[in-house]
Image (cartoon, rainbow, N blue to C red):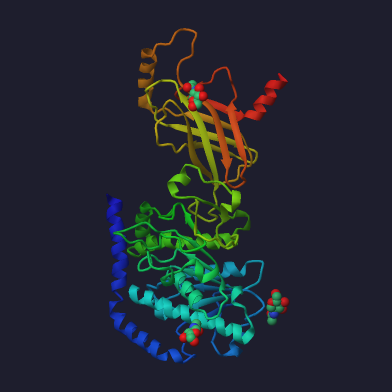
Amino acid sequence: MRSLQLSFLLLSCIIISANTYEGKKKEALRSWSELTRGKKDQQNFETRFRLYTDRAGGNCQIFVNQLETLDKCHFNASLPLVMIVHGWSVDGILESWIWKMAAALKSHPEPMNVIIADWLTLAHQHYPIAVRNTRTTGHEIARFLQWLEESVQFSRSNAHLIGYSLGAHVSGFAGSFINGTKKIGRITGLDPAGPLFEGMSPTDRLSPDDANFVDAIHTFTKQHMGLSVGIKQPVAHFDFYPNGGTFQPGCHILHVYNHIAQLGIAGITQTVKCAHERSVHLFIDSLLHKDKQSTAYWCNDINTFNKGLCLSCKKNRCNTLGYNIREERLPKSRRLFLKTRAHMPFKVYHYQFKIHIINEIQGKPIDPAFTMSLTGTKADAKNLHIPLVESITGNKTYSFLITLDNDIGDIIMIKFKWELPPLWGNIWDTFQTIIPWTKGTRRPGLIVKEIRVKAGETQQKYTFCPQSTDNIHLHPSQEKIFVSCEDLFQTQNRK
Ligand SMILES: *[C@@H]1O[C@H](CO)[C@@H](O)[C@H](O)[C@H]1NC(C)=O
Ligand SMILES: *[C@@H]1O[C@H](CO)[C@@H](O)[C@H](O)[C@H]1NC(C)=O
Ligand SMILES: *[C@@H]1O[C@H](CO)[C@@H](O)[C@H](O)[C@H]1NC(C)=O
């Protein structure tokens, strides 16, 4: 209940902060008409192109049709260009992530030009006006790229636009407005804005047609009153939905109270930004942690993904999130899913577990209260909760997804434990006396026949069998050890 109320509070906060710009509306409308009037004047650009120069946030402004500014700013036309395009602005200043992103790009081993497209004057407006201004800004970016092509033979195919929120659609418009047959090289949409774009035709939002390659990361598509901050629908060749795309770990509603306690009412904005801006930090992470690239997997929806059913990399079904994505043009958008941690580095290791369980107590479903400990060649993972919700009946294979924060190497042993809730203990004992079983036969219980594991990151498959074949029944509070069936076979042969 509390969280529901809070959701409304969050949305009203967005609306309220939007309304405080109501006063600027007139001014905005004026600047809009001035803009349309000034269209013919090639010098009249609202967007400022700031070439990022150093970590201290230094930048050097490039003016269209002023060639000397390219020299002055040390624009190198033989290097690729990455342009960062910000989104809707509530406070009229460039947000701190922009400088983090620019620094991360600069830290990349391949040198590049990093330009920040500063369209603050058009973005710091009432939301619907800022939305309208995305076209103006897109057009200006297109003109900027055309000018680079004409003046210093910089090919647009070497340009990569990275747009956040409204900036994603700005980038899309830049790609569709640019004249000529060739397209911009790549566009990355970081949680592209949803309101006034969701469900629109591809020409009215970011779409795969806007560049040779388009990728998008969706991180905050949770709906509040039929609206979501980020766009839900696929808009790219590859659309990534970390943790399902609706909301992000570490941004949870409980943290809202912490944020509010720390930052007062500004904490609410921080919370809204948390999941929305996560898309940005996932991308930065991909630049900063070369050895911790996150893999995402093609899947229909998050529920199927949570069953561990989508961890295949066959026929290019998986791809790398962020800067180092495998660029592949597909006829149809592909939705990719992954889990992440709450902090950088965000990477987790995905595993599908398939456990074959026989419940010998006919007609008595059992609550799936199990834990597992894994022994790997590099590390162990202890007391993992098994995320099964359906109760255990007859004779069935259960599939689920487990994620680990660390690389444990090859899995060599699994301990599987039946955790018994205290209350259950009594019932179970009663049960044991009711169920008739003749002397010499075993007490009925669960038989865990086989555990099969598939590791998403390595595509490695394993099969585990009970270590002891003498006593295969699992009883409450008991733990059984499973070893690789191949190893078991070998040791038995040696005996
Ligand atoms: C531009 O980049 C190229 C390739 O890295 C390099 O060889 C060249 O020296 C650079 N030019 C300038 C003026 O820095
Ligand atoms: C493309 O060409 C058309 C027609 O000449 C022009 O109206 C439009 O502004 C041009 N677009 C850009 C981005 O320069
Ligand atoms: C479980 O089901 C499989 C196939 O559905 C069957 O071969 C096997 O005999 C069953 N085992 C038990 C104990 O019922």
Q: Quadrant of residue 260?
A: bottom left
**Could you tell me residue 129's position as x and y percent?**
34, 77
Tell me if residue 213 can be seen. yes
Q: Quadrant of residue 319?
A: bottom right
**445 and 419: which is toward the camera:** 445
Q: Residue at x 33, y 63 (%)?
A: 264
Can you say which quadrant of the picture contains the C terminus?
A: top right
**Could you tell me residue 489's position as x and y percent?**
66, 25
Tell me if residue 60 can be seen. no
How many labels were placed on the picture?
0
Q: Is residue 482 above or below residue 66?
A: above
User: Which residue sits furthest right?
Assistant: 494
Q: Residue at x 44, y 58 (%)?
A: 219
**Could you tell me residue 3's position as x and y percent?**
31, 52
Q: Is residue 126 left or right of residue 69?
A: left
User: Which residue sits furthest top?
Assistant: 439
**Could you tell me residue 284's position as x and y percent?**
54, 63
Q: Is residue 145 above or below residue 296?
A: below
Q: Is residue 314 above or below residue 186?
A: above
